[in-house]
Amino acid sequence: MTSEAPPFWWEKPDWRVLALSPVSAMYGMVAGRRMRREKVAAPVLCVGNFTVGGSGKTPVAIALAKQAKRMQLTPGFLSRGHGGSFAKPHVVDAHHDAAKHVGDEPLLLAEHAPVAVTANRAAGAKLLMAEHGCDLLIMDDGFQSARIHIDYALVVVDARFGIGNGRVIPGGPLRAKIVDQLVFTGGLLKMGEGSAADTVVRQAARAGRPIFLAHVLAFAGIGHPEKFFDTLRGAGGEVALSRAFPDHHFYAADELADLAALAKREGLRLVTTAKDAARLRHGAAPAGFLEQLDVLEIDAVFEIDHVPERIINETLDAWRQRKMRPSSS
């Protein structure tokens, strides 16, 4: 759930869901059809989710890239970005690009592997392969809409929020019907603690999809700001005051000044997420503000250590099988 998402998406379906059902049905039908796509010459591993909003995809993508490097592969990330647009695919420069142009997640990802930001994932894939020698492409999101063939889709589900009321946009948070999305799902990753995801986990298990478990030491971003505050408490911090802003929010100078003044007046330290810090570092935040800012870093931890290697190997196997099939398939 993003901070802009209607609260009723995460509650038991009511009259609002019923009123929006015709639109949801049409949206789901179109989204389901769009999940067949163009093929590229490298293996593609997608880290996505069934719903709109954050579920911990970015730290998972980073963990998989680290594993790929340990396996002597050269990973590259494909991202649509957020807040900016380019006429052609753009490879993120972590030292010079601004968050408002490339997005905060791509700036985080660029610390670990080359990132191509573009709505045209196929063109981005070709750029990463040609100019950076990437032999494994990891898509951060885009499971339903990337228009590029996915060899393995790892779908991340937040254990605390699950799939909300189970309805398709605009009646709920689902991007398409679960049955349509499961067809293209390679494995399901249940992230964190909680039981809200149990229903969809059972659906995936009945469909024969493997279920993996993981948790994060910190969440990047504030799609669910309360998760970050809970994580901070779990790390031993005392949250005296909290302020939640919209997801991908670009902070204005007066907002930062207010936060700094509040922290000074109350004798508090400012702590934020790694994703917010990326926006601030590559935005207009004054140096003085950054110096007083503490950042809770991100780390995705799989319950079983060899799971990332298994996921990458299954991606490579699917890609090899795809190469052997006729190009018209």
Image (cartoon, rainbow, N blue to C red):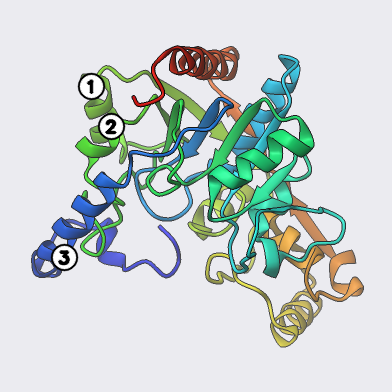
Mark 1 or 2, nearer chain start: 2
Q: CA distance from mark 3 to mark 1?
A: 27 Å
Dividing the picture into quadrants, the one containing residue 78 is top right
Say which of 146 and 200 sits in front: 146
Q: CA distance from mark 3 to mark 2?
A: 21 Å
Looking at the rendered structure, the secondary structure element under dot 1 is loop
Label 2: which residue?
182
Amino acid on which the number 2 mark rests in the picture: Leu
Dividing the picture into quadrants, the one containing residue 289 is bottom right
Disc 2 residue crowd, few under 14, some 14–19, many 20+, Cα 10 Å? many
Residue 207 numbered tag: 1
- Above or below — where is 238 with respect to 247? above
Q: Are marks 3 and 1 in contact (CB under 8 Å)?
A: no
Q: Are marks 1 and 2 in contact (CB under 8 Å)?
A: yes
Q: Residue at x 35, y 29 (%)?
A: 185
Q: Residue at x 33, y 42 (%)?
A: 35
Amino acid on which the number 1 mark rests in the picture: Ala
